Image (cartoon, rainbow, N blue to C red):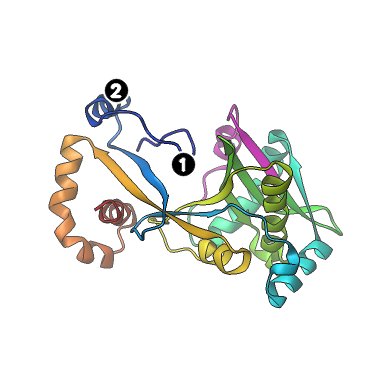
């Protein structure tokens, strides 16, 4: 699948015919891009964003307490790519196993982080032992920050690393860096997750509705259209990748 390299609030200036040529050149099955970003009208597709920092005093009592516990138990800091590669695989591996998913190898994890532009890396350290227990791999683009990959070690969730990580990163990017918004990515299609609901409920993120546009390679487009009437049956069979493809098509239509 081809994605734009820029942030979702930027328009894609390319015709569908030219996009099909790009698909053929790169041997990809489909291209996906966004238009009408942050439309006030409801749509079946959205990004979860935050465009205004909210101080701790404005949170609910429960959230305030959990942020304070996280600040007491943990330290949050920005780190180098080298530190990230060398110290964060164990967090990633444990997190994947907690969801009963198969992690990539340590070698591949370290390799895919090399020579990646516009990335910033954050870790949460357990205060007493200085052990890394959570991380965020962020993509910086056009005055925005995408929290692209966030993982928490399941053995340390009682220290509230998720609360302190979001609080500190939101403050940094929205106050210190004065970015337009931070985002937690688009509507999840591949598997169920509560992460976006968590930041909406606890940290006052919101859904920025938008239009999802998909251009298929001709044969793939035909297969999707033929399979689409049977999507509920396919969903029930839990064929994840096929289900995600059909859910994506549904969101675009």
Element on which disc 1 rests: loop
Q: Earlier in the sequence, mark 1 or mark 2?
A: 1
Q: Nearer the viewer, residue 96 or 62?
A: 62
Question: Residue 17 vs residue 136: left or right?
Answer: left
Query: In the picture shown, does residue 174 fall above or below 67?
Result: above
Identify the image quadrant of residue 60: bottom right
Question: Residue 107 vs residue 172: left or right?
Answer: left
Task: Residue 199: give x, y in percent of width and height.
Answer: 58, 63
Q: Residue at x 73, y 35 (%)?
A: 80
Task: Residue 250: give x, y in percent of width and height.
Answer: 26, 56
Question: Residue 64 vs residue 226: left or right?
Answer: right
Q: Which mark is residue 25?
A: 2
Q: Which mark is residue 176?
A: none
Question: Residue 52 vs residue 241: left or right?
Answer: right
Q: Residue furthest right?
A: 128
Q: Is residue 177 magenta?
A: no
Q: What is the magenta range? A: 103-122
Task: Residue 113: give x, y in percent of width and height.
Answer: 59, 34
Q: Nearer the viewer, residue 196 or 205?
A: 205
Query: In the picture shown, does residue 2 fall above or below 205?
Result: above
Marks 1/2: CA–CA distance:
26 Å
């Amino acid at each position: 699948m081809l994605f734009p390299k820029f942030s979702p609030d930027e328009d894609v200036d390319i015709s569908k015919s030219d996009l099909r040529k790009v698909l053929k050149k790169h041997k990809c099955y489909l291209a996906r891009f966004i238009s009408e970003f942050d439309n006030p009208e409801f749509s079946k597709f959205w990004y979860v964003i935050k465009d205004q920092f909210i101080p701790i005093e404005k949170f609910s009592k429960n959230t305030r307490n959990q942020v304070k516990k996280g600040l007491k138990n943990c330290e949050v800091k920005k780190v180098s790519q080298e530190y990230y590669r060398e110290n964060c695989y164990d967090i990633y591996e444990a997190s994947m196993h907690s969801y009963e998913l198969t992690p990539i190898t340590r070698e591949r994890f370290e390799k895919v982080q090399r020579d990646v532009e516009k990335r910033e890396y954050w870790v949460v350290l357990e205060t007493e032992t200085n052990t890394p227990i959570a991380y965020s791999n962020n993509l910086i683009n056009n005055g925005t920050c995408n929290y692209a990959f966030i993982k928490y070690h399941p053995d340390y969730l009682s220290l509230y690393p998720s609360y302190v990580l979001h609080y500190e990163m939101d403050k940094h990017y929205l106050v210190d860096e004065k970015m337009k918004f931070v985002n937690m990515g688009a509507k999840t299609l591949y598997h169920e997750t509560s992460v976006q609901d968590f930041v909406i409920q606890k940290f006052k993120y919101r859904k920025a509705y938008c239009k999802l546009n998909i251009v298929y390679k001709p044969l793939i487009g035909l297969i999707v259209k033929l399979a689409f009437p049977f999507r509920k049956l396919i969903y029930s069979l839990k064929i994840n990748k096929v289900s995600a493809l059909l859910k994506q098509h549904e969101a675009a239509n």
